[in-house]
Every structure is written in C-alpha cells, then in structure tokens.
Amino acid sequence: MNTRSTNETEAATLATLPVAGPDLPSTTERSGETDAMILRYAIVAGALELLPQTIATLAIVPMQTKMVYRIGSQRGVSLDRKAVVEFMGAVGIGLASQVFEGFARRLAGGLGKKVAGKMGGKIGHAAGGVAMSFGSTYALGMLAKVYYDGGRSLGMETLKAKYPPMLAEGKASAGKYGAQIAERSKQLQGAGLASILKGAA
C-alpha cells in the first residue's frame, strides 16, 4: 500500500472514532475550555497548510470531525459518525469540499507563480490556505458550540445562515495567531497523519 493510500485509510478510520468526554464542568468553565480547544484546533489547521498540500487535504476534515465529537461530548451529547457528518454537511464542510478547496488553492498558487514569480506564488498560496483552514475550523467549532449548547434545536437552514459570518470572523482572526501557526507547523514537520490527528489539540 502506498503512502497516500495509507494516509487515506488512517484519515477515514480516525474520523469515525468517538472521543470519550470528561465529567461535565460548569457552563462557564466548559465554555472557556471549549473556546480554547477550538482555537488550538484552528491553529493546527492553519499550520497544516504550511505542510505538503496532501497532508492538509487529508488531515483537516478528520481533525474537524474529532473536534465536533469533543464539543458534543463536553456537553454530554453522545454522537455517532453520521450525526457529525450531517452537522458538518449542513454548513458545507466535507471531504469533497475540502479536496476542491485544496485543488483550487494549488491552481491559484500556480497561476500566481507565473504572474508574480515563484516566491510570490508560494506566499499567496500559503496565506490564503492558512486563513481558510483556520477560519473554517474556528467557524465550525463555534457553530457546534452554539448548536449543542442550544440542545440541537437550530434547524439546518439556520446553521447554514450562521456559518458565513463566523467563517469571515475566523479568517480575519488568523493573522493574530501567525507566530503560533508557524511554530505549530515546525512541530508537525515529519509527523505521520495518525500522529497529527491524535495530537491535534
């Protein structure tokens, strides 16, 4: 089995594993813990964009899936893979969209190199990818927090409507954490997909 096939198998397997939740803390404490966890996941997602694109494409969706599991678990919600996938699909997050985004960024990066030179293309590609992956992970986490705190009463259309402004907020915030994203990327250099996903946050 080649490296890509192995990574795809690991990603598919790890994305289905529920994460055991801790004893439930108070609402205020839980909210603070969740916010910190979402930020850690967003930083890792941004850092992955500074690694080879194949790793980012394969790792980010399973990592986001794990994050949603953990947010639900913190609130005493027992989730299966189908429930998480449906939630993520409602806001447009999924493997197909992630692969498309990765391809589009690579294409845009290639065009940028022709126009602005090799270094300009790399910088433009990395900055756009980091902001999108950080922002989408941040938005998904915050939306999951609102959704599960509200007893899963929000409808799918409401979730879809709430996602774009949260995504914009996340993308705008990515620059504040540039140093942490770069440092996390260095720490992830050479790590296998399974190690990245298990130690994401």
Image (cartoon, rainbow, N blue to C red):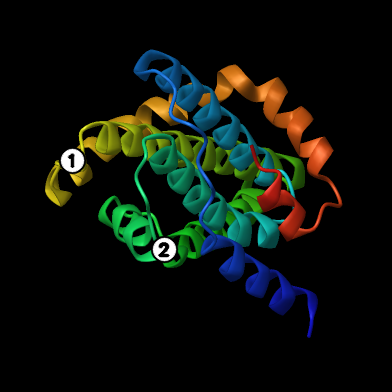
- The quarter of the image holding the N terminus is bottom right
User: Residue 114, which numbered label?
Assistant: none
Q: Where does the image place residue 160, in percent across and percent down from the top left?
A: 21, 46
Spatial CA distance of label 2 from label 1 is 23 Å
Taking the image as shown, residue 47 lies to the left or right of residue 160, namely right
Give the residue displayed 38% in from the left and 25% down from the top.
169
- The quarter of the image holding the C terminus is top right
Say what amino acid the circle numbered 2 marks: Arg
**In front of the other: 78 or 31:** 78
**In front of the other: 56 or 144:** 144
Residue under circle 1? 161
Question: Is the residue 128 above or below the residue 175 in the image?
Answer: below
Taking the image as shown, residue 140 lies to the left or right of residue 133, namely left
**In front of the other: 72 or 100:** 72
Question: Is the residue 144 above or below the residue 61 in the image?
Answer: above
**Quarter occupied by residue 111:** bottom right
